[in-house]
């Protein structure tokens, strides 16, 4: 009897939690519609939590779906706490490098401290703006943005920049999950990519959490390569 009561309480707590999460997502989405701002640094720590990493968006699986090889150069836009960054860095080690870029100094400083603390030598946290990367044309093998692209005011502009710095055989990997208030549907992400001159190469996941890989689509002759 007592166990049943506890199960009932637990069930209601879970329902209330899911409802609160839903309401929060709707409110944030409405605010975001009128006012774009980067997620505050401390919140990136909340998003990158053990439940997400274990059950929802596993770093190992995400890295596997990026088709990484040792020696590759990777740009990660908006690395947050860096859990995904660390896994990607392991896969491209020892020669490969991950450039973890963000516009917020606080995010980069925290990641620098983590990287130093954990003795990782192939991650380079740096301030950079995805609207105008400081990387050379056709210089990187992989670009990854995890729950990040829809937060940036001009996603198509960012993807055009990705196209510019991506090697001919490179991939841009876009990963989204539905509990993110900025979550875009697959078809929205695909439309942004197509507008930026990228074409779909691999598609993974479900409506709830997905990962899409894009490569360079040839541009019309008049626009160059
Ligand atoms: C939602 S957080 C990323 C969370 C992290 N990828 C994760 O999955 O845990 C998005 C990050 O993108 C960064 N960002 C926003 N606009 C940017 C831009 N134009 N260039 C680079 N980073 C940007 C924000 O500062 C923020 O830290």
Image: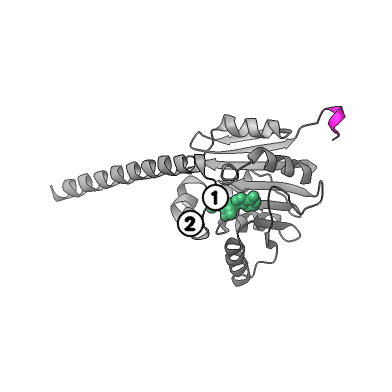
Judged from this view, the residue extending furthest toward the left is 1
Q: Is mark 2 within 8 Å of ligand 1?
A: yes
Q: Secondary structure at mark 2?
A: helix
Q: Secondary structure at mark 1?
A: loop
Dominant secondary structure, magenta: helix
For label 1, the residue is 37
User: Residue 163 lies in what quarter of the image?
Assistant: top right
For label 2, the residue is 43
Q: Residue at x 17, y 45 (%)?
A: 4
Q: Is mark 1 within 8 Å of ligand 1?
A: no
Q: Is residue 147 left or right of residue 13?
A: right
User: Residue 215 lies in what quarter of the image?
Assistant: top right
With respect to residue 106, does 173 lie above or below? above
Q: Quadrant of the C terminus?
A: top right
Residue nearer the viewer, 54 or 85: 85
Residue nearer the viewer, 36 or 53: 36
Q: Is residue 179 visible?
A: no
Colour approach in the figure? one colour
Residue 142: image location, x then y, percent? 71, 47
User: Residue 65 lies in what quarter of the image?
Assistant: top right
Q: Residue at x 65, y 42 (%)?
A: 173
Q: Is residue 67 visible?
A: yes
The stretch of residues the image draws in magenta is: 220-224
With respect to residue 43, does 23 lie above or below? above
C-alpha gap between disc 1 and disc 2:
13 Å
Residue nearer the viewer, 208 or 157: 157
């Amino acid at each position: 009897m007592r166990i049943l009561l506890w199960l009932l309480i637990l069930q209601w707590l879970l329902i209330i939690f899911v409802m609160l999460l839903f309401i929060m997502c709707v409110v944030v989405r409405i605010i975001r519609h009128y006012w774009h701002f980067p997620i505050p640094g401390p919140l990136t720590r909340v998003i990158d939590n053990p439940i997400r990493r274990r059950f929802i968006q596993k770093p190992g699986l995400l890295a596997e779906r990026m088709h990484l090889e040792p020696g590759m150069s990777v740009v990660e836009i908006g690395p947050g706490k860096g859990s995904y960054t660390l896994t990607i860095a392991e896969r491209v080690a020892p020669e490969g490098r991950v450039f973890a870029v963000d516009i917020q100094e606080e995010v980069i400083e925290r990641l620098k401290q983590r990287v130093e603390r954990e003795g990782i030598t192939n991650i380079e946290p740096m301030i950079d703006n995805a609207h105008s990367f400081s990387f050379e044309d056709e210089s990187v093998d992989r670009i990854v943005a995890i729950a990040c692209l829809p937060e940036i005011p001009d996603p198509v502009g960012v993807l055009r920049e990705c196209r510019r710095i991506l090697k001919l055989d490179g991939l841009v990997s876009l990963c989204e999950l539905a509990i993110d208030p900025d979550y875009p549907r697959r078809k929205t992400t695909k439309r942004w990519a197509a507008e930026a001159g990228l074409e779909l190469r691999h598609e993974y996941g479900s409506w709830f959490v997905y990962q899409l890989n894009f490569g360079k689509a040839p541009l019309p002759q008049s626009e160059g390569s």
